[in-house]
C-alpha cells in the first residue's frame, strides 16, 4: 500500500497492470485458468483455492510411487530383521550365560572327582594287598 500512496493519480494503471501480470504468472504456474477478467481479490481467492487443492493432491510419478512402495517394503523388512537380530542376540547371551554356568559346574565336578579318586585308590590298595597276602588272585577288569 505504501507503494500506491506515493503515486500520482494518473499513474496507478501501470502498477495495477504489473500486479495483475504477476497474479497471472502465478496462476499459470499453478496451471489455473486465465483470471484476468475477474477482480483482483477474486483472482487471489481462486488462486488460494487452487494452491490448497494442489497441496492435497498426490500427483506422483508412477515410477517414483513404485520405488517408494519398494522402499517402504524394504524398510519394513529391515525393521523385522533388526527385531529378529535383537531376539537372537538375547538368546545367544542367555545361552552363553548358561554355558558359562555349566562349565563352572563341570569344573566343580572335576575337582570333586579328583578329591575322591585318591581316597578310593588308597582304600583299594590295602584291599589288594590283603588279597595277595591271603593267596587270592587279583581279577583284572576286562577292557
Image (cartoon, grey):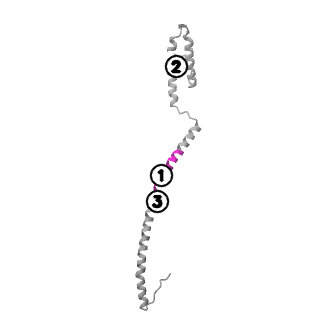
Residue 42: % across, % down: 50, 18
Find the distance from the CA under tag 3 to the CA under tag 2: 73 Å
Residue 112: % across, % down: 41, 72
Q: Which mark is residue 96?
A: 3
Which residue corresponds to the image point at 57% horizontal and 41% vertical from the top-left?
Answer: 67
| Mark in front: 1 vs 3 | 3
Q: Secondary structure at mark 2?
A: helix
Which residue corresponds to the image point at 43% horizontal and 71% vertical from the top-left?
Answer: 111
* Category of crowding for the residue at label 1, using alpha-carbon neighbours closer than 10 angstroms: few (below 14), some (14–19), many (at least 20): few
Q: N-terminal of the two: label 2 or label 1? A: 2
Which residue corresponds to the image point at 41% horizontal and 84% vertical from the top-left?
Answer: 126
Residue 84 located within the stretch drawn in magenta: yes
Q: Do tag 2 and tag 1 residues touch (Cβ < 8 Å)?
A: no
In the image, residue 10 above or below residue 117: above
Q: N-terminal of the two: label 1 or label 3? A: 1
Q: Secondary structure at mark 3?
A: helix
* Category of crowding for the residue at label 3, using alpha-carbon neighbours closer than 10 angstroms: few (below 14), some (14–19), many (at least 20): few
Magenta segment: 74-91
Q: Secondary structure at mark 1?
A: helix
Q: Which residue is mark 1?
A: 86
Residue 98 located within the stretch drawn in magenta: no
Q: Which residue is mark 2?
A: 43
Q: Do tag 1 and tag 3 residues touch (Cβ < 8 Å)?
A: no
Q: Quadrant of residue 25?
A: top right
Answer yes or no: is residue 34 visible.
no
* Category of crowding for the residue at label 2, using alpha-carbon neighbours closer than 10 angstroms: few (below 14), some (14–19), many (at least 20): some
In the image, residue 112 above or below residue 132: above
Residue 133: % across, % down: 42, 90
Q: N-terminal of the two: label 3 or label 2? A: 2
Amino acid at each position: 500500500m505504501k507503494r500506491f500512496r506515493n503515486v500520482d493519480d494518473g499513474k496507478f494503471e501501470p502498477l495495477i497492470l504489473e500486479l495483475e501480470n504477476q497474479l497471472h504468472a502465478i496462476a499459470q504456474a499453478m496451471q489455473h485458468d486465465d483470471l484476468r477478467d475477474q477482480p483482483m481479490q477474486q483472482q487471489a481467492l481462486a488462486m488460494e483455492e487452487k494452491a490448497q487443492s494442489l497441496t492435497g493432491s498426490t500427483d506422483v510419478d508412477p515410477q517414483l510411487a513404485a520405488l517408494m512402495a519398494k522402499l517402504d517394503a524394504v524398510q519394513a523388512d529391515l525393521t523385522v530383521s533388526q527385531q529378529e537380530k535383537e531376539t537372537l542376540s538375547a538368546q545367544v547371551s542367555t545361552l552363553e550365560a548358561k554355558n558359562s554356568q555349566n562349565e563352572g559346574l563341570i569344573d566343580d565336578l572335576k575337582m570333586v572327582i579328583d578329591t575322591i579318586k585318591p581316597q578310593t585308590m588308597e582304600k583299594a590298595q590295602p584291599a589288594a594287598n590283603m588279597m595277595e597276602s591271603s593267596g587270592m588272585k587279583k581279577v583284572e577288569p576286562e577292557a
